[in-house]
Image (cartoon, grey):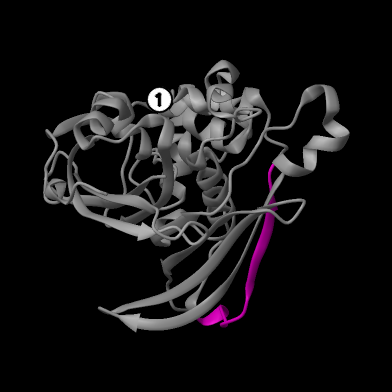
């Protein structure tokens, strides 16, 4: 059964700087392109981003997934803390609310907490449960503005 | 880059243009691993996945969500996007380069979606859309929603 005492647990805050090269690399990966000339220029070119209504080069809508992976110490410390076995881990869902655009050069501070922990009985195996852990992250920029709120649902099968 | 989109021009039931990915290869997966920092061996190391009975590596769910996001930002200017949420409902196995004829369909993803609700809230004109990402065999990978705050004419 899921360890419900983990609900409310907070992880150490960390800060991630939005680097130009990293944004282009990520945009190329999700666009399946080999060169930055072939992707949406709002992720590459200052002028294109301004023309699209941003104050500078912006990030793809799912880029923030790498904040924790690159500067929070990666997924493993989180899983260890939660007692989740990597081999049994599934990504159940992901949700983002966007408040203020993020631009290259921003420094984003992330605060993650365990928002919920619950069990669900397996449809095909009555009496057997899957354990759900919902992580909620608040991301603020260097001006202290809330930029994104995210919720990740991790499933241990 | 997406063209301008007005609240007045969207009707409930309107479909977003379908977006189809290239067949996902192991190279795409490795590129995404490097770009995102997600080095879970499930996505690139077959000696890891065979330990628990899987035949081949699978794509990151977040690469599939990233591709789904591409469809959205091709359809509407990204600055209008307020919310994007998905549930992962199926794994995506990459195409095998030595057997593209039989394996491309399982890894080539098409994103479709439609407007389901128009409403005003907090002084904003909002449209909610449903979105789905599936392979060419009908295997659904993602079901989700996104909400955009659109300008009026």
The total number of labels drawn is 1
Q: Nearer the viewer, residue A19 or A12?
A: A12
Subunit ID for the residue under disc 1:
B
Quadrant in the picture for residue A57: top left
Q: Residue at x 27, y 53 (%)?
A: A100
- Residue B113 is situated, as x and y percent measured from the top left of the image, at 60, 66
**Quick one: which residue is furthest to the right in this view?**
B101
Q: Is residue B48 above or below residue B113?
A: above
Q: Quadrant of residue A31?
A: top right
Residue B20 part of the magenta segment: yes
Q: Is residue A63 magenta?
A: no
Q: Which of B84 and A131 lies nearest the eye of the viewer?
A: A131
- Side of B130 where B106 appears, left or right: right
At 42% from the left and 72% from the top, the residue drawn is B151
Q: Is residue A96 visible?
A: yes
Instruction: Kindly state the secondary structure of the residue where label 1 is placed.
Output: loop
**Relative to A41, does residue A98 appear above or below in the rendering?**
below
Above or below B36: residue B10? below
Position in image of residue A105 (x %, y %): 27, 31
Q: Position of residue A40 (x, y in %)?
A: 56, 41
- Mark 1 burial class by Cα count in 10 Å: few <14, some 14-19, many 20+: some
Task: Residue B46: name its quadrant.
Answer: top right
Give the extent of the magenta segment: B8-21
Q: Residue at x 55, y 37 (%)?
A: A30
> Is A120 in front, or is A102?
A120
Q: Position of residue A70 (x, y in %)?
A: 31, 25
In the image, B148: left or right of A15?
right
Determine if residue A18 is in view: no
Dot 1 corresponds to which residue? B37
């Amino acid at each position: 059964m899921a360890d419900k005492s983990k609900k409310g647990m907070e992880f150490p805050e960390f800060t991630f700087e939005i680097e130009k090269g990293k944004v282009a690399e990520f945009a190329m990966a999700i666009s399946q392109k080999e060169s930055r000339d072939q992707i949406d220029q709002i992720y590459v070119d200052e002028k294109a981003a301004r023309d699209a209504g941003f104050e500078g080069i912006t990030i793809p809508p799912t880029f923030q997934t790498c904040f924790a992976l690159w500067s929070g110490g990666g997924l493993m410390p989180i899983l260890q803390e939660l007692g989740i076995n990597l081999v049994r881990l599934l990504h159940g869902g992901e949700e983002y609310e966007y408040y203020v655009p993020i631009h290259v050069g921003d420094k984003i501070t992330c605060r993650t907490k365990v928002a919920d922990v619950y069990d669900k009985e397996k449809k095909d195996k009555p009496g057997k449960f899957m354990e759900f852990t919902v992580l909620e992250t608040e991301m603020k920029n260097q001006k202290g503005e809330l930029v994104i709120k995210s919720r990740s649902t991790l499933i241990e099968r | 880059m997406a063209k301008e989109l007005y609240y007045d021009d969207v009707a409930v039931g309107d479909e977003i243009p379908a977006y189809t990915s290239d067949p996902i290869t192991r190279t795409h997966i490795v590129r995404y691993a490097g770009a995102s920092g997600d080095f879970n061996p499930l996505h690139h190391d077959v000696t890891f996945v065979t330990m628990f009975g899987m035949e081949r590596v699978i794509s990151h769910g977040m690469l599939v969500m990233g591709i789904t996001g591409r469809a959205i930002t091709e359809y509407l200017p990204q600055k209008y996007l307020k919310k994007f949420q998905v549930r992962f409902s199926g794994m995506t196995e990459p195409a095998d380069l030595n057997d593209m004829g039989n394996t491309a369909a399982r890894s080539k993803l098409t994103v479709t979606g439609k407007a389901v609700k128009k409403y005003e809230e907090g002084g904003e004109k909002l449209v909610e859309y449903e979105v789905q990402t599936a392979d060419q065999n009908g295997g659904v990978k993602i079901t989700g929603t996104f909400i955009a705050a659109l300008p009026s004419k």
